[in-house]
Amino acid sequence: MLKERIKTISVLLYGLTLIVLGSILLIRTQWMIDLLYRINLFAILGLSASRVLTGILEKDRNKRTNGVLYGTFIFILFLLVLNFPIFFGAMIPFLYGLWALLSAVVKFITWYNFHVDKIYNRIWAFLDAFITFIFAMLLILDPLPGVLRLTYVASAYLMFYGSMQLFSGINLLLNDLLKDRYKIFLHFPLPMFISVLLPSRIYKDLHKPSSRTIDFRQNVDDPQAEDELEIFIHLKEGNKEGLGHVDVSYRDFIFSYGLHDPLNRHLNGTYGDGVLIQANRKRFIEYSITGENKTIVAFTLKLNLQQIKLMEERVIGLLERTEPWYPRCFMDDSINDYSSRIYKNTGAKFYKFTNGKFKTYFFASTNCVLLADHFVQFKGLELVRLNGLITPGSYFNFLNEAYQRSSPMVTRRIVYEKMKKNANNAPLV
């Protein structure tokens, strides 16, 4: 109880702090810019000194040279910022401009994806990309006036984000008075860079000794009830695997979407033909944790009669836009890519989309999380509402928060993992 009160108070104070900072930034812009300048000046000097010092202490000659050179380069940057404050004023908008330009490129690829797949209302995706590109060019080509633009945007963001945190604190205070269907609108998504890295952190946390109290399972003992929808968050060590993956299960069938055709992948494995896998839930989970060495966090969502009907219509509508596709092992049994392994070990069916959304996969828009969102976010099925870029990390964060506050929306959380044994051959559960 005390822990929950402390959490509530901290959320309220955090929200108020952000609102105050946003207000100060708006009212006393120059004062905040000067403060930020001094903080960054000391930070650059400290980083330079630490890099030179660690470089000198390195035993390896190459690492020692690289450390000293890197620290010296940062010190030169410190001198530039110290003697030419205008350099600092131009640097921040320029960096934000580069970030906005990257975002515009991603949005243009998304629009092109929608254009090729003939998705309705794709004009809005184009306008979003075009406006982001114009904003990026303004910051990159005219950085100094961009300071004021960034100040206003940052101020508005801080006050908005602080308001959401304040609402979340009020939500915790009135936990028993507010209906859960209204609580979900108070959820504020994680920043993109945090949500992208969250699955990797979750995986490490689950494998700490303190996590043994969590409900770990290896066998899928309970069949899926007709009024249950499950969302699976796949976790694994590695570069791409560390970003996480999301699957949906309904009526004892897993639906998994991704770049499962290795012959049709582009842009370093981020763009290509979308492939849908339909597999037996029990066989798919057990092979994923034993054969692919994954950890799966499963969230169970309860459906009412109306939602069950809508879910069935959505599954049928999705499959009607597909045609069968066969993994490469059909032609050569020695091939052992991911699709072939799934087929050999689970007997899954594979489909490619003939038209519309999901025909083309793109990591930043039409991805595995969008398939889950396709099932659980549409009119009449108000189970999950997420804003911004949807990632496995943001989806986990939303569902886990709902489960931890005993929401009737999320009724169960189970972690499936291959059993590990310690030195005494005792299972770590």
Image: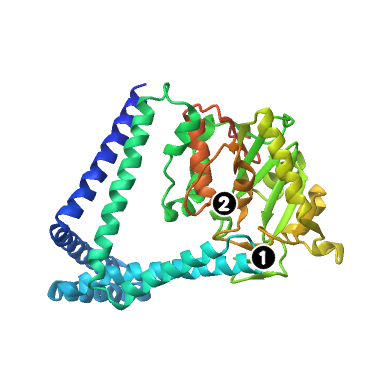
Residue at left offset 85%, top offset 66%: 332
Q: Secondary structure at mark 2?
A: loop
Residue at disc 1, secondary structure: loop
**Height in image: 2 above or below 410?**
above
What residue does disc 1 label? 117
Q: Nearer the viewer, mark 1 or mark 2?
A: 1
Query: Where is residue 49 shown, x and y percent of the image?
Result: 21, 66
Looking at the picture, how far across and down is residue 234, in whole percent? 61, 47
Residue 350 figure quarter:
bottom right
User: Mark number for residue 244?
Assistant: 2
Viewer-proximal residue, 413 or 114?
114
Question: Can the viewer see residue 426 in this picture?
Answer: no
Q: Where 406 sits versus 44, above or below?
A: above
Looking at the image, is mark 1 or mark 2 earlier in the sequence? 1
Q: Which mark is residue 97?
A: none
407 on left or right of 336: left
